[in-house]
Image (spheres, rainbow, N blue to C red):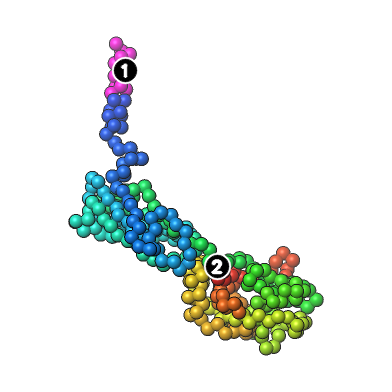
């Protein structure tokens, strides 16, 4: 009898646990009362994951329903795959609290994926479901990105890569560039800072091959093809890296921002290492002879392991 008595409390606990387990909802089915459907209501409508082009119009017509509980708001949640996330909360009128229809309209102006979820909140502002569905819009690549292109300071008697082609994204030494001069858009030259006390600092200047007075006297480019690539004055801002990464995200956005600048320069004219020339965190916009717009972000000016001085740039250019 003592053994039976000892087991009775444990048996009671197990019964209570089983009872509670039956009463609680399964986490995998507790949000099944909310449904989301998509509708083909216009020529720009998508009803499932889709691939589009930069500049395309996109319409997402949706209906969200709740079978057992009133919806007080519907949240449109979107992510773009690069860490940027946004939400828009839509208050629901009394007549729509069991079924609400709406539409999201936008023009695609970023490469890559954007994912949309539509979910409902109850009167306690608690999530009650999203229909276990979402819709992803994927924009085809519309620009090329060339990262960490290193343009080396020209040195007489050496043959360092100090020329750049925007069509290939490659850097070339003088001897290499001579063989493909029809592809070369820019070169760099360097001078020492003009200010007393700073004369050991190099100033990097960008130039197109069409410049009136060629700045590197020991390079003969007289027989080269001269591409008429133009660029803007360097643009400085406190958030230029973020701007380059998160705003210049499609061909159309690059063109929009480039057209805000005057793109008519063939050479920068810096005489101080921290202004006028190619300075870290600055953006230089450009346009090729073919009409393609782009932007160049200056990462840094530094030395490599062989103690050779160079400036590093990231480039975005329309396809």
Q: State which quadrant residue 200 falls in.
A: bottom right
For the C terminus, the image quarter is: bottom right
Q: Earlier in the sequence, mark 2 or mark 1?
A: 1
Q: Does residue 103 lie above or below 231 as drawn?
A: above
User: Does residue 6 appear anywhere in the picture?
Assistant: yes
**Alpha-carbon distance for marks 2 and 1?**
75 Å
Badge 2, how many Cα within 10 Å: few under 14, some, many 20+? many
- Classify 167 as above or below 120: below
Q: Which residue does the image show at 57% across and 85% down from the upper left?
A: 264
**SS category of the residue bearing label 1:** helix
Residue found farthest to the left = 94
Q: Who is closer to the viewer here, 236 or 163? A: 163
Residue at (41% x, 54% y) in the render: 48
Q: Is residue 272 above or below residue 28?
A: below
Q: Which residues are magenta?
A: 1-13
Residue 142 on the magenta span: no
In this figure, which residue is indicated by the disc labeled 2? Answer: 143
* Residue of label 1: 6
């Amino acid at each position: 009898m003592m053994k039976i008595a000892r087991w009775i409390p444990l048996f009671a606990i197990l019964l209570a646990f089983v009872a509670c387990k039956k009463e609680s909802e399964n986490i995998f089915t507790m949000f099944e009362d909310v449904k989301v459907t998509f509708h083909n209501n216009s020529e720009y409508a998508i009803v499932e994951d889709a691939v589009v082009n930069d500049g395309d119009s996109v319409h997402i017509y949706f209906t969200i329903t709740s079978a057992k509980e009133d919806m007080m708001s519907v949240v449109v949640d979107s992510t773009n795959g690069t860490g940027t996330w946004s939400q828009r909360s839509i208050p629901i009128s009394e007549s729509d609290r069991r079924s609400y229809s709406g539409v999201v309209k936008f023009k695609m102006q970023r490469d890559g994926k954007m994912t949309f979820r539509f979910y409902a909140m109850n009167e306690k502002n608690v999530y009650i479901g999203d229909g276990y569905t979402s819709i992803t819009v994927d924009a085809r690549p519309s620009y090329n990105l060339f990262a960490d292109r290193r343009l080396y300071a020209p040195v007489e008697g050496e043959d360092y890569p100090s020329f750049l082609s925007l069509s290939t994204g490659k850097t070339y030494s003088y001897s290499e560039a001579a063989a493909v001069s029809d592809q070369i858009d820019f070169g760099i030259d360097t001078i020492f800072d003009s200010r007393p006390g700073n004369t050991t600092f190099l100033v990097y200047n960008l130039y197109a091959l069409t410049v009136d007075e060629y700045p590197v006297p020991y390079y003969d480019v007289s027989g080269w093809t001269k591409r008429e690539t133009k660029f803007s004055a360097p643009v400085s801002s406190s958030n230029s890296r973020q701007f380059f990464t998160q705003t210049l995200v499609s061909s159309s956005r690059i063109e929009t921002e480039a057209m805000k600048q005057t793109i008519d320069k063939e050479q920068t004219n810096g005489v101080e290492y921290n202004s006028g020339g190619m300075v870290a965190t600055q953006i230089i916009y450009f346009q090729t002879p073919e009409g393609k717009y782009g932007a160049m972000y200056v990462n840094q000016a530094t030395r490599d392991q062989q103690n050779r001085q160079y400036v590093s740039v990231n480039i975005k250019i329309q396809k």
